Amino acid sequence: MKKNVFMLLVAATMIISCSKDDDNNNGGSSTVSGNTSKLCNKNWKLTSVLLDNVEYIGFLDSCELDNFTRFNTNNTYVNDEGGLKCDPLAPQTQNGVWSWKANETQISIDTSENYNVLVNSGTVIKLSSTDSSSGVVSVFTFGL
């Protein structure tokens, strides 16, 4: 379960780095889906962690709560430790890749973690996953 929460925090922090300058090399214009435009160019911070409908955000340290993720339209993301780092030796940022799955109803983070997209409003992202071994349902909410 801790791995699932950690991966979600990493995913949450890494989902927020979309750049207006990114394009798909088609003469400078870019084709971006509505869900991608809602996701990208924003610093997403974790606002809620539900594990089997029990809120756990209060158990996170302030050095975890200031982390943010920024998704880019080129399917990369940056996970930033924010101003407070839990481990001073940890890198400030980590990069990864993301992609839409199942007609943009799921998001894949670093090709190993898939989350169901419950909400993607442009100001709130809510993702869920079910741990295959324990059956614990995790719901992560991110805001701006």
Image (cartoon, helix red, strand yellow):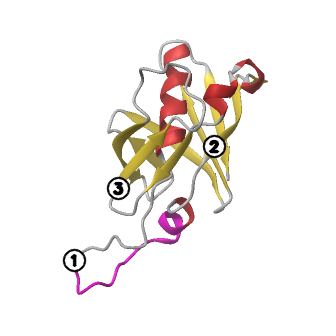
Task: Identify the residue position indicated by label 2 in the image.
Answer: 45
In the image, what residue type sits under mark 3? Asn
Q: CA distance from mark 1 to mark 3?
A: 14 Å
Which picture quadrant has residue 46? top right
Residue 35 pos. (x, y %): 52, 64
Q: Earlier in the sequence, mark 3 or mark 2?
A: 2
Residue 10 pos. (x, y %): 48, 33
Q: Tell me, yes or no, if residue 131 can be seen here.
A: no
Residues rendered magenta in the picture: 26-37
Task: Identify the residue position indicated by label 3 in the image.
Answer: 75
Q: CA distance from mark 3 to mark 2?
A: 19 Å
Residue 128 versus residue 30 in the image, above or below: above
Residue 121 pos. (x, y %): 66, 61
Which picture quadrant has residue 51? top right
In the image, what residue type sits under mark 2? Lys
In the image, what residue type sits under mark 1? Asn
Q: Is residue 61 left or right of residue 91?
A: right
Q: Residues within 10 Å of mark 3 (few under 14, many from 20)?
A: some
Task: Identify the residue position indicated by label 1 in the image.
Answer: 25
